[in-house]
Amino acid sequence: MMRDHDSKADAKLIRLPRWLTSDHPFPWLFPASAMLIIFGLYPVLYSLWLSMFKRNPATRIETFRPSWNWSKVFADDRVIDAVSITLTYTLIALTIQLVLGLAIALLLDSDRKGFGLLRSLMILPLVVPPAVTGMMFLLMYDGSFGVISHMLYGLGLLSPSTPILAGGTSALWGVIIADVWQWTPFMVLIMLAGLRALPKDPFEAAAIDGATDIQAFFRLTLPMMSKIIALAVLIRGIDLFRIYDYIKVMTDSGPGTATETLTAYAGTIYFKNADFPYASTVALFTLILVVIIANLFIKIFKVRF
Amino acid sequence: MHDSTFKLTLRYLVSILIVGIFVFPIAWWGLTSVKPISAVFDKDRIVVFDFEPTLENYRVTVLGYSKRGSKEDGKTLMGTSGNNSYDGRSSIVSSVIVAVGSTLITTIIALLASFGLSRMQFWGSQGYLNWILSQRFLPPVAIIVPLVFIFHDMGLRDTHTGLIIAHTLINIPIAVLLLKSFMDDIPIDIDQAAMIDGATRFQCFWMVILPMVKGGLAATAVLCFIFSWTEFLLSLFLTNSIRTIPVKITTYVTSTGSEWGYISALGTSAILPSFIFILLVQRHLVRGLTMGAIKD
């Protein structure tokens, strides 16, 4: 009876090819793949195609000159400056965030009353839109009524004649501080997860052997956390390298080009010069740098997802 | 564990101080939003809390009332765009439409893809995963110029649909990897048991796996919502008249001065929903931020 029923049902159905049934990965992966190909891969290839045109700023005519923009990138002083500013920014911010993140995680890693609330409050900066963060710090840095500026005046670290975002070096630091404020909590969260997952036994054994807390930290905690630290550095490092929001909102690459990162430069070429081929080239150049650095990092530190 | 009272007190104090430093900018921001304009710009009253709290800034930005006093004295208006340029209601609506829309689409697409990646073995699956991961590392700037052209040709420029697609694109990698990590936690035996009982793959997904990843799905959805809610660059390039909150706020800065009261009121309103959401999924937050690489 049963078999009879089944074959009747089968006869009514149109037999789909196997790759269209739910037994095959194709239908499952199709929507995501289509999305990523049309709006992710295709634009990158389109970018590459665009980068092969030379734009004449006066006539606005674009002619096919494959190597024009690429040789321009490597000869452009602003690109070289932007690379060094991007790297400086990334390395300084990353170091501060990592050290602070680890220190704060160690401090807040306690089951005592109140630490849970403190950990929750620590997440707050993460949900603020970066553009809003930029505005917040603009308000606090303001030369005449900014609260941070006033504290610095009081401490004698800053004079009212040079606002924080008006000096070349101090402007970069101003942006870095906003970034550190927003993203140190990210490090804290990841480090806390790492600390919580550490086995207890080695620490008890070390304590019995008379190791100090500092020795235990450098000999046990750090080596056991190395994988998690590498992962956090990779994710954060890539995001830092493509920094755009803070720069755009806070300094708009200024004063002069003192805070012009690679992405900010690409944006400037796009908005101000409307030289789309060259903007694409600089953006692709950024992408290539990210891919090279990230892959080197993954190989060296054996990061796995 | 064996801390003395002194050490413990010190630890509490230092912890509260540091967390306080991190909360301070937001608190300051909230405070600015209820200050009357005169108190914001008065440099003698910066740290003195000597002002009458007012909700005027919220009335103008969130409720869309026109700026008070502007009828009598039109010349005091900053900028040239008139009264209603500080009305943030349309940007709140846009942000909600885009964030909810892209979260829905992202989670549906990512659920399917992550099930395929977690439950099936096929040639090139590791390569496929790497490809998805590499999308996460793509600087939005690298695709923004062609995306503007493509969107223009498809009529998607300056539309909610276009922005939903753009945000879906940047959220898919995170959502797929995260949901895959949640599905990987469910033993494959459960699928096999269901399929021996006659379930098809799809029934297995719909009736067995989906109910089991509900918590992970909620966490993924919240993260997607927040990424879309806070996104700035794509919204800035892809839209002109439709403005999400982060982009709208930056337009309040004009060459003649910044309306800090309005900026902070709209900013505070934008932070509140994300913070409530994120507290709900705090347990899965670390996994979410590392795209499933660190389990909690």
Image (cartoon, grey):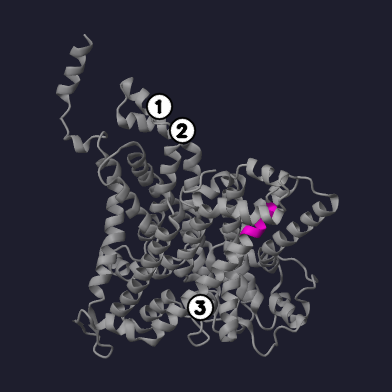
Q: Farthest residue to the top: give it.
A: A1
Image position of A298 with respect to A289: above or below:
above
Q: Farthest residue to the front: give it.
A: A209
Mark 1: amino acid = Ile
Residue A296 on image: x %, y % = 39, 64
Q: Earlier in the sequence, mark 3 or mark 2?
A: 3
Q: Chain of mark 3?
A: B
Q: Is residue B59 visible?
A: no
At numbered mark 1, what does the secondary structure look like: helix, strand or loop?
A: helix
| Residue at mark 1 to residue at mark 2: CA–CA distance | 11 Å
Name the residue beneath numbered marker 3.
B81
Q: Earlier in the sequence, mark 3 or mark 1?
A: 3
Asked if the residue at tag 2 contacts the one at tag 1, i.e. Cβ–Cβ closer than 8 Å, the answer is yes
Asked if the residue at tag 2 contacts the one at tag 3, i.e. Cβ–Cβ closer than 8 Å, the answer is no
Nearest the viewer among A111 and A227 is A227
Residue B69 on image: x %, y % = 65, 75
Name the residue beneath numbered marker 2.
B212
Name the residue beneath numbered marker 1.
B190
| Residue at mark 3 to residue at mark 2: CA–CA distance | 52 Å
Residue B61 magenta-highlighted: no
**Which stretch is magenta?**
A102-108
Image disc number at residue B86: none
